[in-house]
Amino acid sequence: MSKELGSTILKADRVHKSFGDLEVLRGISLDLAAHQVTCLIGSSGSGKSTFLRCCNLLERIDGGTIELLNHDLADEQIDENAVRRHVGMVFQSYNLFPHLSVLDNVTLGPRRVLKQSKSEAEAHATELLARIGLDAKANEFPDRLSGGQQQRVAIARSLAMNPRLLLLDEVTSALDPELVGEVLDLIGDLAAQGMTMLIATHEMGFARQVADTICYLEDGLIVEQGSPAQVLDNPSHASTQRFLNRSMD
Amino acid sequence: MTQSGPSLSATEEPINLYASSRPRLRGRSGTIASAISTTVVIALLVILIASPSAKPFREGFLNPHQMWLAFAGDPMKGILSVGKGFLLNIWLSLICEVLVLVFALAIATLRLTSGPVLLPFRGIAIAYTDFARGVPVILVMLWIGFGVPAMNIPVISTQSPVVYAGFVLTFSYSAYVAEVYRAGMLSVPRAQVQAARSIGLSSRTTLRRVVLPQAVRNVLPALLNDFASLQKDTAIVSVLGVTEATHAAQIAAGVEFNYSGYTIASLLFLAVTVPLTRYTDRIMAKDRNRRLAGGL
Ligand SMILES: Nc1ncnc2c1ncn2[C@@H]1O[C@H](COP(=O)(O)OP(=O)(O)O)[C@@H](O)[C@H]1O
Ligand SMILES: [Mg+2]
């Protein structure tokens, strides 16, 4: 798979992060160019979520640097709300706002953060919902939707902010197996349209299809990174091979 | 059904699915049964109240003439109108409720912040909540209502008793309502906050648009309960000599040596609090159904 990559969006350099005595990230270095899709794989507890959360400042790092569009996130002048305006995040448990309709979930950010008018935000949101095939559900509340539909709305909610980077944290792990496909298809479409994404996932087949780069994490370190063919088919590290064998069955 | 392999029912013993006691009456016979029992209970109550030996009770508590006299008032006899007085209970409680909603929200929010600068204020908020919830309202009412005017501070000491009363009710109830709000905000999952922050909402907007609406929905019954209490506790204002329903009824009782005025005052309070609690119950039931239906 080869596609035009753009300028650097994210540059992580020897990132360290501890929770108390537990060092969760132990020097993660990773570059992400515009339009690049990178999948983080690795067993649970290896630090995938923590790294994603550091990229939109839900967590603060203890060492190293993360640069987003050439801005050092550790800089005191950085406004975390401005960072999150440009970095979308989708969670395993969707986290839609249960008191708001699907439409209001999608327009909340554009209206309150981007200060778009109601009509402008709703026009854009309706367009987005149509793109994911859920325009008929615009006025429903989240609890009336299936898990797959909720997760697609959560993705639309992020997209409504026109993010430069989208972080996806195991977005299919909470779904019933038959609902996984519709969400992965949507992410595949986004990749094809050039969205820059950092994706933590357990879906190896999906990672192979969608990723330009795969990083295998173990105990807070990137043990191996490269194209899907390199990492998934010819891993050069024994631990990567062991992980892949384990995730086959 | 074909029987193959090991049988799942180990014994062939017959089982009994009937209730051991008499079956409950359902449908038509159920309606008739409840109608009969209701009639009997009401009849017993009427007989009890109408019986000759209950005459002092009827005279003292349920005298229609006295009830009307107290309700309407009689300037010639120096009896103030319980009905008019009750209007004060109503508007005082409405004003206090609005103030309580705002003030309690500020307290609750303050207690849930974590900034180091606000630490002393959090301490004050905690001390305030402990104090206001721990001291009887009537005590604070006497303390402020008589103590403050006696201090001869310009402006502050020269307010009407209604102002002190409103202040005390707001002061006391805000502490309860702040705790209700706080419980509500704590019941909103952290993931909701993270999702809101992740689309760039500030902490303020997150509180306003994401946390509070869910928090209030979760604690609406408790809020309404506190409002019913506040409505009732406006009666305490009478200790400051403010003419509200209870005070007017007290005067009528003193003049007429008859307590039917208290009855009419009670009925007025019930006319407000019963619909309010019924409404609360309905909301609670609806909320329970929503939860049971698998919603959030
Ligand atoms: N807020 C936290 N406080 C303490 N420990 C945490 C916290 N978040 C994550 N951890 C720990 O960090 C490690 C990595 O977690 P995580 O990044 O969620 O891994 P992954 O997403 O790869 O499963 C785990 O051991 C987890 O228990
Ligand atoms: Mg994780």
Image: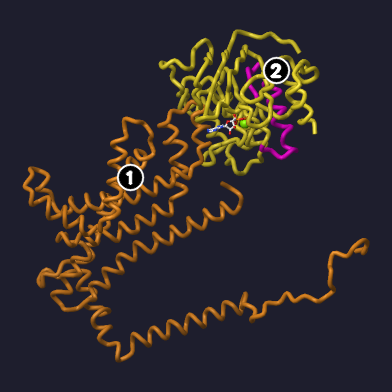
Chain colours: A yellow, B orange
Q: Is residue A141 above or below residue A112?
A: below
Q: Residue A127: x and y, percent? A: 61, 26
Residue at (57% x, 15% y) in the render: A14
**Subunit that carries the residue with mark 2:** A
Q: Residue A174: x and y, percent? A: 66, 38
Q: Is residue A165 above or below residue B98?
A: above
Look at the magenta stretch and give its main secondary structure: helix
Residue A190 magenta: yes
**Subunit that carries the residue with mark 1:** B
Magenta stretch in the rendered image? A174-199
Q: Disc 1 residue type? A: Ala
Residue at (10% x, 72% y) in the render: B77
Q: Residue furthest bottom?
A: B52
Q: Residue furthest left?
A: B152
Q: Which residue is mark 2?
A: A224
Mark 1 element type: helix
How many marks do you count on the picture? 2
Q: CA distance from mark 2 to mark 1?
A: 54 Å
Q: Which residue is mark 1?
A: B104
Residue A178 magenta: yes
The answer to the question of whether label 2 and label 1 lie on touching residues, with beta carbons closer than 8 A, is no
Q: Disc 2 residue type? A: Glu
